[in-house]
Structure formats: C-alpha cells, structure tokens
Image (cartoon, helix red, strand yellow):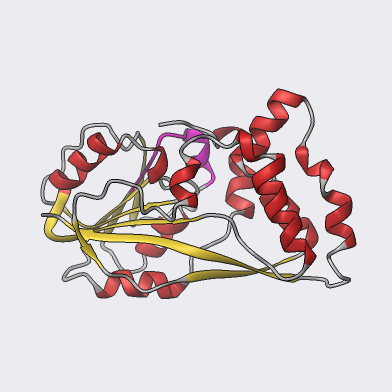
Amino acid sequence: MKDNFSGHSADYAKYRPTYPQELYSYLFSLLDNKENAWDCATGNGQVAVELAKVFKHVWATDLSENQLKKTRKNEIITYEVRTAEEFVTQKDYFDLITVAQAVHWFEFIKFYKNVNKSLKKNGVLALIGYSIFTTEGTLNDIIQHFYNNIIGSYWDPERDYLDNQYRTIPFPFREEVVPKFKMEVYWTQERFLNYLNTWSAVKHYEKKNGENPLKLIENKVKTHWENEEIRLFEFPLLLRVGYKN
C-alpha cells in the first residue's frame, strides 16, 4: 500500500471533509450486534471516533504513524500502526469493518483474506469513498479542468477506482443494495484551496515541477468566487457494503 499522506498529515486531518451522520445510521442499522469494529486505514481517525459512539471497542489501524498522531484519543479506540494486508489474529470477531477513502490502495486479495477471517458470520464490510466534487457556476468548470487537465496525469493509477465509483474494485461478498448518500460542505475560499492542497496529485506535481499547481488557478478562483463568503460543494459518496459468504 502506498503512503501518500504522512508528509502532510496535519493538513489532511484539518481540511478533509467528514462523512454525514446518515451514513453511520444506515451502517449501524444493518448490524445485529455492535461489540467490535475495525476501522482499517483510519487516517485521522474520523470514522473510528464515530464508531466509538456505539461500539464497545474499535480497533483503528493505519500504516502512517504520522496520521495516527493526529487522531483524537478515546478509551474505546485502540490505535495501531499496521497495514491492511498484515496477518490478523482475530477470528470471527468484528461486527463491522470499515475502510474510508483508502481501499483503492490495498492489495485486495490479502486484505479480503483478513476480512473473511476476522468478520463475524453476519458482520458487515463497508467500503466508503468519494471522488471529485461539484459546485455551481464557472467555479465548477475551473475545478474540473484542474482535476482532469492540470494535475490529471499526476494521479496514481489507483485513482481510477474512485473515478469509477468503486464499481471496478473486486468485491467477493454478498453485496447489499445501498441508498445514495452525499456530503455537503460549506467552505470559505481559503478552506477550499487548502482542501485541494491535500490531493496526492498536487503533491506529485509539486515534487516534479518545483511549484504548487494551485498557483495556476488561484486568480481564477478568486474571480469566480462571486463575492460569497462561503460556497456549497457537494461530494457524491461511494459505498459498497457486503456480508461474508
């Protein structure tokens, strides 16, 4: 699994959007029990913290020690530095396994072997993610051009899984038909640009060219922000949910 985020873990924790409560309520409604959960590739721990509100224990793992340093400590949560593919000792243990905005980096066969071993018979695996977002007006055209054309060639190949709505990811589980969810955020111009600056393709561009590609669109963003203090941005949520066969 690639680690594209340890170098800017503080910004990742601060500027990435959070998932809607409706998503968690839906996942919890699928469960017979809420004893143990595994949030794999927990990153800044935002999902683990939500799971800790209803589970007795949450195991939150990530390959990045820097990311885990930015998590909120919680007596319900056990944080551990480890990859998704490392051998797990738990057997028929977890009621819920979540992976948020990360499964596209995994070695699927190894991770799914861990899932099949550690998930309870009626336990649930939830793969959560989001790709490019939208807004109204000319600013949306600027975003799409930046995403596809300016930094398009700097995305890792795994980004295709997100752009394809996670439908091309292998999923050898009894799949649940899920409702559609979306994330809505209201951002200032500064917050918007700081979010873009967390993208791995921005970092790849900067490393290769010696300058931040956001400089290429900053003036256009200011021009087309349309004198609003905050703007609405919408992320279609990607979700695949399944049970162990």
> What residue is drawn where x is 41% and y is 34%?
63
Residue 39 at x, y percent in the picture:
34, 51
Of the pair 150 and 196, the residue shown nearer to us: 150
> What residue is drawn where x is 47% and y is 44%?
160
Of the pair 209 and 30, the residue shown nearer to us: 209
Q: Which residues are magenta?
A: 60-70
Camera sees residue 124: no
Left-right relation of 181 to 112? right
Is residue 68 shown in magenta? yes
Which quadrant of the structure image shows residue 185?
bottom right
Quadrant of the frame with the N terminus: top left
Please say if 40 is above or below 178.
Answer: above
Residue 37 at x, y percent in the picture:
27, 56
Left-right relation of 235 to 52? right
Residue 72 at x, y percent in the picture:
49, 53
Camera sees residue 154: yes
Q: How many marks?
A: 0
Residue 67 at x, y percent in the picture:
51, 40
Is residue 237 shown in magenta? no
Please say if 193 is above or below 186.
Answer: above
> What residue is drawn where x is 22% and y is 42%?
112
Left-right relation of 195 to 100? right
> What residue is drawn where x is 77% and y is 38%?
213
Quadrant of the frame with the C terminus: bottom left
